Image (spheres, grey):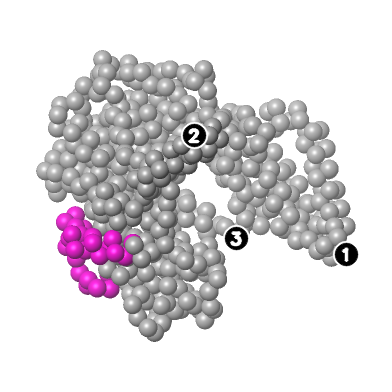
Amino acid sequence: MRKISAARKTILIAISAVVLMSAGLVGTKISDNYFEISKNLEIFTTLYRELNIYYVDETNPGELMKTGIDAMLKSLDPYTNYIPESDMEDYRFMTTGQYGGIGALIRSVDDNVYISEPYEGFPAQKNGLMAGDRVLKIDGIDVTGKDQEEISKVLKGQSGTTVVIVVQRHGETKPTTFEVVREEIKIPDVPYFGMLNDEVGYIKLTSFTHTAGKDVKDAFLKLKKDNNMQKVVLDLRGNGGGLLREAVNIVNMFVPKGEEVVSTKGKIKEWDKVHKAINEPVDTEIPLIVLVDESSASASEIVAGCVQDLDRGVVIGRNTFGKGLVQQTRELYYNTKLKVTVAKYYVPSGRCIQRLDYSHKEEDGSVAAIPDSLINHFTTKAGRPVSDGRGIEPDVLVIDEKLHKILLSLLEKQVFFKFANDYRMQHPTIAPANEFTLTDKEYAAFTDFVLKQDVSYTTSTEKAFEKLLETAKEEEYFEGATTEFEALKSKIKPYHQSDMERFRDDIQMVLENEIVSRYYYQTGRIQATLARDRSIESALEVFNNGTYKDILSVNYTGK
């Protein structure tokens, strides 16, 4: 009887949740489908009850329900999600950038979990935990065999509580114990800002939590006051978005009060809204460049798209992700939530930058990009051509060189992480982040280190050769050219040592970045890459060669 009662209770909760979610839809087409909704809810509740009562093995009603909910939502789009109470802390982190914990990134390496990067100024770093520390125990519990997600949840907790962490430090024989008092961790939206040269300022924005607008504004004003900044680069690369209102606030810094920033349109009238700049701007004249890439999404695309549509600045980099969907959270029972897509957003030209059409999924669940035949064309305020359905296409395209297989393999095998741990133990200090570089001797030591690791990779050339070899055998050409084929195979076979030298520039840049993070944390990582950043180079070139204004003119054809 207890099992039946639990099942019925869960069913009632599910029905109530649906009724609550539907309550705001009265007067829409949903009301016309009332019978269909009611019928299917009845089918679902009876099926759920019968399954929990009669299934041959014991069932977990909660897990069954979550599986059903997740599968239902998966049929829609990847942004519509059920958030159980156990994931509420992660949800809070996504929206506020805040969580209770020790303030450190962790990662899995060779079936163990390590501290990979403490956040500067937070408990882990202040108590002496270092990147490379292997986590052994947490509050007396052996964490051997536990995965990264499990350990992350244990490390998080209410601010003010103490967690005891036992680690094995790299290069030491005995474990070390740390008693760390958790704090409210707030990851800064702007982890770094500074000057690229005497005139050009740089602001890196990594997220759009509730402090994003304030952080960008504070950084901007400080650069103007302390460094007499004359031009500015806003870096949105890798920024997956966040709160729409913060995107509006940031655009508002650079455009006049009353200017339209973004509009939203949904099935329900309450989501047909126009968001305008409601505050006095900070600076409507300063030359502005926005950097984007394929990981710039959502709120990042609103900022970049609005700057482009209003001809307020130049967008540089690579095509953005293409997420033009707006989500809202709806409260459910027992401290759970539904994050649901409620609208699409449109930047000032009228275009929606959504790339994938989730309303027309294939039978296998795959989603295709909006076809070229359905792409619409718009113009910016000055009359420059722009299109929808493809994310934000930059005004100046920066194509990065394709990463070679050896670099990808070194990353996959965590070789940079391992070597940086060794390096940190042998070098108490290094040069400032923006000046640090490895010597030839140190790079040679890294090459020796790599040759001792299990680093294997197959190049595209090798794959093409194997296909050629297979075809030659099928068509009976191989027997008469065996020597030639063997010679060619020998020449194209990758040799780790020669590849380490051939692709040294890229490999060394990644390695230096990893080493710098051991001493200067996230800020150091950013500083270390700026001097060799192609998008930064392109931005400075646009500022310096006089093409900035040309790009913003309707007659410009140099994209």
Frontmost of labels 3 and 2 is 2
Which residue ends up furthest to the left in the rendered image? Answer: 198
**Direction from residue 438 to residue 103 in the image, left or right:** right
Cα gap from disc 3 to disc 2, whole angstroms: 63 Å
Residue denoted by label 1: 1
Specify the label residue 209 is tagged with. none
Q: Amino acid at mark 2?
A: Tyr
Specify the label residue 477 is tagged with. 2
Name the quarter where the C terminus is drawn.
top left
Residue denoted by label 3: 86
Secondary structure type for disc 2: loop
Query: Which callout, 3 or 2, points at the residue further toward the start of the chain?
Result: 3
Q: Amino acid at mark 3?
A: Ser
Secondary structure type for disc 1: loop
- Indicate whether residue 432 is drawn in magenta: yes
| Nearer to me, 426 or 539 | 426
Q: Position of residue 153 (x, y in %)?
A: 52, 65
Report the span colored magenta: 424-450
Residue 25, compared with residue 50, is above or below; it is: above
Residue 463, compared with residue 427, is above or below; it is: above
